[in-house]
Each structure stands twice: as structure tokens, then as C-alpha cells.
């Protein structure tokens, strides 16, 4: 069976001894392997990073569900004579302490997975524009997470 060598710079025709043969010689096989050596490592690293990102977002979502925004000492009203730091009163817009000392969350953060699910549910351009505006204004997501949500990568 006659085939073309899979190593692009060579590409010559050769008589294949097996139907699974890809290269005309050992040197072409070695050169192809050396040229494509880094691609496998990059793909494995990318896959690992995506899995780590999903795990981190899931963990953050679970932590957000546990006693979200409540400080027991403040909830009991034990705030007399206690000077609260400014960043505690309004920590990255997570919440505000009211008169009773309870922390009222402004809104619960969404994970990148929820954003992707919402994007897939968009039925028209107006819904997508609204979704995109909400995504871009989210202070909890990094620029990389926002880009991944737009391109459907998790």
C-alpha cells in the first residue's frame, strides 16, 4: 500500500508495510515527535487548569452557602465599644452591616458555570446583551473567567 509520509517537511510517497504506518523512515518519525513534543504537555496542563478552575468555583460556591454574610458576634449585638475597620463594613461590596450588626449581603456571587448555563439559555440578542452586561460588571470573576464564560470553557 502506497502512502504519503505524515511528517510535513518530508511528505514523500513510500510503500507501507503496515496499514497503520505513518512515516517513511525512523528519522521522520523522530523529527515529528520532537516537533510535537510540547503540544501534549500544553494540552495536559490546560486540561488540569480547567479542572482546577471548576473545582475552585465549586468550592467558592459551597463556601458562599455556609452561613453567608453572618458574623455571630455582630448578630448578637456585641458591637458596643468595638471599632470595626472600614474594610469590614464594606468588604469588596460583599455586604453592609446594618444597625443590628447583621451583615446584609448585596448579592450572592455566581460561579462561572452558572454564567455559562445562563448564556446557553439566552434566546435572542437582547437577552445575550443583558447577560454580557451582567457578566462584565461582576466584581467576583477575574478577566480570565469572564473570557472563559464567553467562549464556553470551564
Image (cartoon, rainbow, N blue to C red):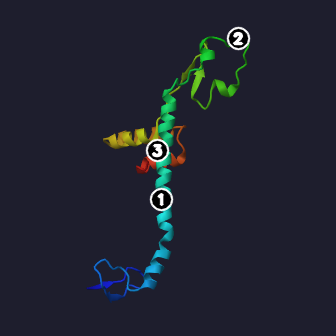
Query: Where residue 54 is drawn, which disc sits there?
Result: 3
User: Does residue 63 appear left or right of residue 11 in this picture?
Assistant: right
Q: Earlier in the sequence, mark 3 or mark 1?
A: 1
Query: Which quadrant would the N terminus be assigned to in this image?
Result: bottom left
Task: Answer with mark 2 or mark 3, whichever residue precedes in sequence.
Answer: 3
**Which sits earlier in the primary sequence, circle 2 or circle 1?**
1
The residue depicted at 33 percent of the width and 88 percent of the height is 13
How far, Cα to Cα, is label 3 from label 1? Answer: 16 Å
User: How far apart, in angstroms, are the residues tagged by discs 2 and 1?
Assistant: 55 Å
Q: Residue 149 location in percent, x, y?
A: 44, 46
Vertical arrangement, residue 66 with respect to residue 54, above or below: above
Mark 2 sits on what residue?
Answer: 80
Mark 1 is surrounded, within 10 Å at the Cα level, by few (under 14), some (14 to 19) or many (20 or more) other residues, namely few
Note whether 89 is above or below 30 in the view shown.
Answer: above
Examine the rendering and report whether any part of residue 48 can be seen. yes
Q: Are marks 2 and 1 in contact (CB under 8 Å)?
A: no
| Classed neighbour count for the residue bearing mark 3: other residues with Cα under 10 Å, few (<14), some (14–19), many (≥20) | some
Secondary structure type for disc 3: helix
Q: Residue at x 47, y 35 (%)?
A: 110
Q: Nearer the viewer, residue 34 or 142?
A: 34
Q: Mark 3 or mark 1, which is nearer to you?
A: 1
The location of residue 118, given as percent across then percent down, is 37, 39
Percent position (x, y) of residue 44? 47, 59
Q: Which residue does the numbered mark 1 point to in the structure image? A: 44
- From where the camera sits, is residue 9 visible? no
Relative to 14, 67 lies left or right: right
Amino acid at each position: 500500500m502506497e502512502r504519503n509520509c505524515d511528517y510535513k517537511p518530508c511528505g514523500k510517497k513510500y510503500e507501507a508495510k503496515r496499514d497503520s504506518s505513518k512515516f517513511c523512515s525512523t528519522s521522520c518519525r523522530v523529527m515529528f515527535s520532537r516537533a510535537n513534543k510540547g503540544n501534549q504537555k500544553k494540552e495536559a496542563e490546560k486540561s488540569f487548569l480547567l479542572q482546577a478552575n471548576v473545582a475552585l468555583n465549586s468550592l467558592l460556591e459551597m463556601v458562599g452557602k455556609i452561613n453567608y454574610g453572618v458574623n455571630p458576634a455582630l448578630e448578637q449585638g456585641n458591637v458596643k465599644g468595638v471599632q470595626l475597620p472600614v474594610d469590614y463594613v464594606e468588604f469588596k461590596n460583599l455586604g453592609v452591616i446594618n444597625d443590628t450588626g447583621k451583615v446584609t449581603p448585596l448579592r450572592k456571587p455566581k460561579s462561572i458555570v452558572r454564567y455559562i448555563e445562563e448564556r446557553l439559555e439566552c434566546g435572542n440578542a437582547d437577552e445575550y446583551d443583558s447577560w454580557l452586561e451582567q457578566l462584565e460588571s461582576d466584581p467576583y470573576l477575574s478577566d480570565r473567567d469572564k473570557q472563559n464564560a464567553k467562549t464556553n470553557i470551564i
